[in-house]
Amino acid sequence: QVQVVESGGGLVQAGGSLRLSCTASGSIRSINSMGWYRQAPGKQRELVALITSTRSTNYADSVKGRFTISRDNAKNTVHLQMNSLKPEDTAVYYCNVRGETMYNYGMNDWGKGTLVTVSS
């Protein structure tokens, strides 16, 4: 069984910064990618940023230049540094982890989410 736990959400004024963290634990053999997704009220969940085991990254156009994803492979941890936040960044942010478990099953697990609220 795999657990994915996010932290770091909160309330911030427009132009401010927040840092989200996510740690995966449990019966993990390998992690291929770790990513952050977000879902705003009334909208579909969307990819924010993704990082692979080789540290290749992919960002949504709306956050390029403002958000930075990083990863600590040894700790199965991913961070999302969010700068120059805008009210439209308000959403629940979810961490996603993909890879393989110790039992050779595919792994595609989600955290419960952390709320980010950006006030204008």
Image: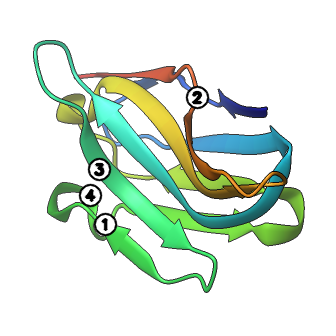
Marks 4 and 1, how far apart in space?
7 Å
Kind of residue at badge 4: Val
Instruction: Give me the residue at 33% from left, 34% from top.
Output: 38
**Residue 101 percent across, percent down from the top left:** 75, 52
- Asked which quadrant contains residue 15, the reply is top left
Marks 4 and 3, how far apart in space?
10 Å
Element at badge 3?
strand
- Most extreme residue toward the left is 42
**Residue 32 percent across, percent down from the top left:** 60, 69
Counting residues from the start of the chain, the first of labels 4 and 2 encountered is: 4
Return the residue at label 2: 111
Instruction: Give me the residue at 33% from left, 51% from top.
Output: 48
Return the residue at label 1: 59
Q: Nearer the viewer, residue 12 or 3?
A: 3
Instruction: Give me the residue at 64% from left, 31% from top.
Output: 8
In the picture provided, is 88 more to the left or to the right than 113? Answer: left
**Residue 103 percent across, percent down from the top left:** 81, 51
Counting residues from the start of the chain, the first of labels 3 and 1 encountered is: 3
Return the residue at label 3: 47
Return the residue at label 4: 63
Query: Disc 2 vs disc 1: Cβ atoms closer than 8 Å?
Result: no
Disc nearest the viewer among 4 and 2: 2
The local crowd at label 1, few if under 14, some if 14 to 19, many if 20 or more residues have their Cα within 10 Å, is some
**Residue 12 percent across, percent down from the top left:** 44, 25
Kind of residue at badge 2: Gly
In the picture provided, is 119 more to the left or to the right than 31? Answer: left
- Asked which quadrant contains residue 52, the reply is bottom right
Q: Nearer the viewer, residue 13 or 118?
A: 118
Disc nearest the viewer among 2 and 1: 2
Disc nearest the viewer among 4 and 1: 1
Query: Disc 4 vs disc 1: Cβ atoms closer than 8 Å?
Result: yes
Element at badge 4?
helix
